[in-house]
Image (cartoon, rainbow, N blue to C red):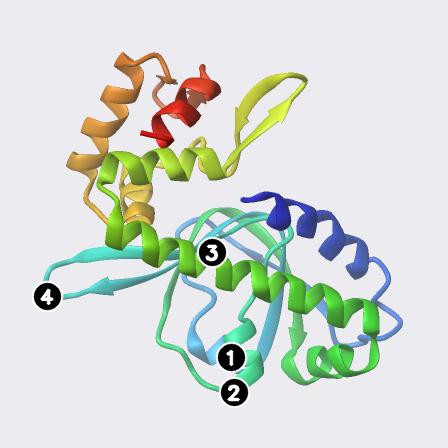
Amino acid sequence: MDKIHTNNYSLVLGELNKLPPLVKNQRKVFFKKGEDPLNSLNTSKYFYFILSGKIKIFQIDFNSSKEQTLYLLSRGDMFDAVSLLDGSQREQLSEVLEDSELIQMPIEDVKDMILQDNNFRQLFYSYLASQLKSMEDLAISLSFYDVYQRVLQLFSKFTHIKDGKPVLTVIDNLKNEDIASMVGTVRKVVNRSLQTLKKDGVIELSRKKIQITNFQKLLDKLDI
């Protein structure tokens, strides 16, 4: 995601390597593509650290069938901080987009870690702040920008420079339906935006992948 979140990837996993002596009840769990594992029954008891894969957290309006992605969890993410902090059962839906491996810990153990381990406490609250910022950005984007600009913002957020070249990560192989869900629209509208970006020389599209070809042009269009 953004730079703060990217740094959290390595920090979270680095801290996990230090935790086994403290958390005897942690265990690895595996979820297959298409499953809905992070429902309110699970997150009221357990806290999760994502080691690999992708899991979408979303809400859906069953009257209109419109879907809005709230979080796209991948390597280094945690879930669910809100349930951990206030004990509520949140009615959110989840979908495993890629086979995923997670560490599952009882919520009470994670609360003890926050109280007893200063390094983990700082890590947890830094991550929580990044998630709050992400939700704030989503609210602003949905309120003030059209779909084309929202797609540009999404691609900018998930693009990293590697060996001098732009690399789109996490969302590079998502279906257009999932991209639409992330920017608050439907596939047909996202398809038009993607074709415009391709025509403008910003991206290349293949059957299962999106590639950023001109990141500077993408940034320039964000400034319009």
Q: CA distance from mark 2 to mark 1?
A: 5 Å
The residue to which callout 2 is attached is 87
CB within 8 Å, label 1 to label 3: no
Residue at screen point 44% across, 21% down: 211
Q: Is residue 3 visible?
A: yes
In terms of image quadrants, where is residue 113? bottom right
Residue at screen point 35% across, 76% down: 91
Question: Residue 143 or 47: which is nearer the viewer?
Answer: 143
Q: CA distance from mark 4 to mark 2?
A: 29 Å
Q: Position of residue 128 (x, y in %)?
A: 59, 66
Looking at the rendered image, the quarter that the C terminus falls into is top left
User: Taking 50 as reference, is 193 above or below it?
Assistant: above
Looking at the rendered image, the quarter that the N terminus falls into is top right
Q: CA distance from mark 1 to mark 3?
A: 18 Å
The residue to which callout 3 is attached is 134
The residue to which callout 1 is attached is 83
Amino acid type, residue under disc 4 in the picture: Asn
Answer few, some or many: residues within 10 Å of disc 4's Cα (few below 14, many 20 plus, some between 14 and 19). few
Answer few, some or many: residues within 10 Å of disc 2's Cα (few below 14, many 20 plus, some between 14 and 19). few
| Left or right, 149 with reference to 217 | left
Amino acid type, residue under disc 2 in the picture: Gly
CB within 8 Å, label 2 to label 1: yes
Amino acid type, residue under disc 1 in the picture: Ser
Q: Is residue 209 visible?
A: no
Local SS, label 3: helix
Q: CA distance from mark 4 to mark 1?
A: 27 Å
Instruction: Return the mark for residue 63.
Output: 4
Amino acid type, residue under disc 3 in the picture: Ser
User: Taking 5 as reference, is 208 above or below it?
Assistant: above
